[in-house]
Image (cartoon, rainbow, N blue to C red):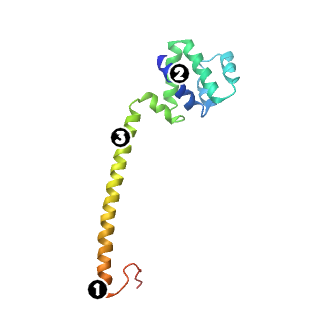
Amino acid sequence: MDKLKSEQDRLCMWLSDDPDHILQECGNILSLNEFLAIHKQSSAYEKMRELLKIITEKGGDACQSFFDILRQNQACYPKLQQLFSPNTQGKDQSVALKTLHLVSKVQYILTILDTLVLGGLKKKKLQDGTNPRRPLYL
């Protein structure tokens, strides 16, 4: 229940991408009146806010059922993975840094290769008078 309250803003944002889907999934948790109260809300974000309010008011069992629903629907709402793997963001940053480091190494190697190839081609042009950049056709 505390997790739902502390993550309410992010959950509302993520789930508002497709509020009807998550509401359908929560059919066993909500009464008809609760479902109608949620649908009265003017925006998708407000619908999700109302949904979370109702679920947290119902207590621990409803919250656990809702978490199970969220876990099962991570494919529909990929950002939910952050809720279940709090270290994901750090891992994403680590992967981004490693990728950036790898890209810089590749750029460095390409610069060296370019220098070597162009240097060799310039020597070839100087030696035999042909243009090394013009393709040779047989």
CB atoms of marks 1 and 3 within 8 Å: no
Residue type of the residue flagged with mark 2: Phe
Tell which circle, 2 or 1, labels the residue nearer the N-terminal end: 2
Residue nearest the observer in this picture, 126 or 135: 126
2 vs 3, front mark: 3
In the rendered image, the vertical position of residue 135 relative to residue 45, given as above or below: below
- Secondary structure category for the residue under label 3: helix
Q: CA distance from mark 2 to mark 1?
A: 76 Å
Q: Which residue is mark 2?
A: 66
Q: Which residue is mark 1?
A: 127
- Secondary structure category for the residue under label 2: helix
Residue type of the residue flagged with mark 1: Gln
Q: Residue 105's image quarter?
A: bottom left
In the rendered image, the vertical position of residue 105 relative to residue 59, given as above or below: below
CB atoms of marks 2 and 3 within 8 Å: no
Q: CA distance from mark 2 to mark 3?
A: 31 Å
Q: Position of residue 132 (x, y in %)?
A: 36, 80
Q: Which residue is mark 3?
A: 94
Q: Is residue 76 left or right of residue 111?
A: right
Q: Which residue sits furthest bottom?
A: 128
Q: Is residue 103 left or right of residue 80?
A: left
- Secondary structure category for the residue under label 1: helix
Q: Position of residue 50 (x, y in %)?
A: 62, 20
